[in-house]
Amino acid sequence: MKITVLGCGAIGKLWLAALSGNHEVQGWLRIPQPYLNVNIDSLNGEPFYGQFTTNDPEFLAETELLLVCLKAWQASEAVNQLLPQIPESCPVLLLHNGMGVARELSRVTNPLLTGVTSHGASEENGLLHHNRNGMTHIGPVNDRARHYGYLADVLHDALPDVAWHNEIDAASWQKLAVNCVISPLTVIYDCKNGGLMAHLPQVRELCDEVALVMQREGIHTDSMDIYEYILHVIEKTADSSSSMRQDILYGRYTEIDYITGYLLQRARYHGILLPENIHVYSLVKQKEEQNAPFSS
Ligand code: KPL
């Protein structure tokens, strides 16, 4: 297959490298450069070094999958810009933290899919560390994407595990819950994920509020399930710095508007008040504003 990866941060580079084993791939960058070097300490157990084509319009015109690894707040504008240059049959798969981008792209007529991943990667001095093996869940957003289950196999062969869901909402909400609790608190307390073990009452309060909204969205869950799952994620990722904390540390915009912001928007729709989430949202926005001017 011909695959274009839009957005070549740590996760984008990881997919680019992993997919290059069996497919023709290119990266698409906001600021074009002649090629992209990807250096990974360990990919599926082996070190990886590759040099990739970028921003080739002829390749784009024949691309058979557009994999979008941009931050949530960058995604819809960038996808809308590229749509006229890709075939109408080319599936577009969104892979970012947070929710709400699929709604922004509801007019897209290409097959549109969304997904979440728990792979962890970070880059330091040009070397990518694949910090955490994870699981990726993908599924359709529009009707045209319902028959694209084979994409889960394509992705699974490159970077396991990948699961297909005919209804992706439950997986998206479960990841949103994790990000609503862990991400803002790691910014507020400026700590790694494991540091949240010192703030469990607040973790629990956020879980209670998230559960209320999830239930109203038709997701079969309760506060205790969410809390236990989040404790498990905190323990498993104790040494990691959340991507939101890294965004703040590097002076970048965060995805808070698509994480807690999205939760609050859905809560408003259902007529539910979430005081603790409103509180953490405003603290992260304050930190973000102190960071201006932003870089992406
Ligand atoms: O998804 C994450 C992120 O940092 O974006 C978590 C699960 C919070 C791990 O750090």
Image: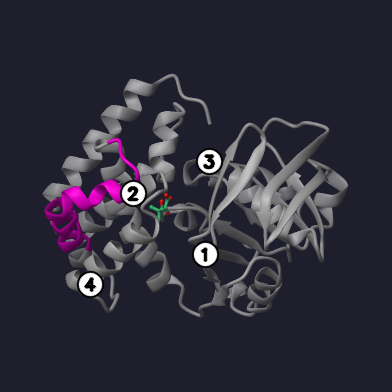
Span shown in magenta: 190-210
Question: Is any atom of residue 83 visible in this view?
Answer: no
**Label number found at residue 134:** 1
Q: Inspect the image, locate mark 2, and give the three-letter code of the amino acid beneath it.
A: Asn
Q: Inspect the image, locate mark 4, and give the three-letter code of the amino acid beneath it.
A: Gln
Mark 4 vs mark 3, CA separation in Å? 29 Å
Q: 14 or 79, which lies in front? A: 14
For the point 33% across and 49% down, which residue is it?
Answer: 193
Mark 2 vs mark 3, CA separation in Å? 25 Å
Q: Inspect the image, locate mark 3, and give the three-letter code of the amino acid beneath it.
A: Gln
Are dots 2 and 4 in contact, CB under 8 Å? no
Q: Which residue was labeled with disc 2?
A: 193
Q: Which residue was labeled with disc 3?
A: 74
| Category of crowding for the residue at label 4, using alpha-carbon neighbours closer than 10 angstroms: few (below 14), some (14–19), many (at least 20) | few
User: Which is closer to the viewer, label 1 or label 3?
Assistant: 1
Label 2 lies in ligand 1 vicinity (Cβ under 8 Å): yes
For the point 16% across and 54% down, which residue is it?
Answer: 200
Q: Which residue was labeled with disc 4?
A: 215
For the point 48% across and 47% down, which residue is it?
Answer: 72
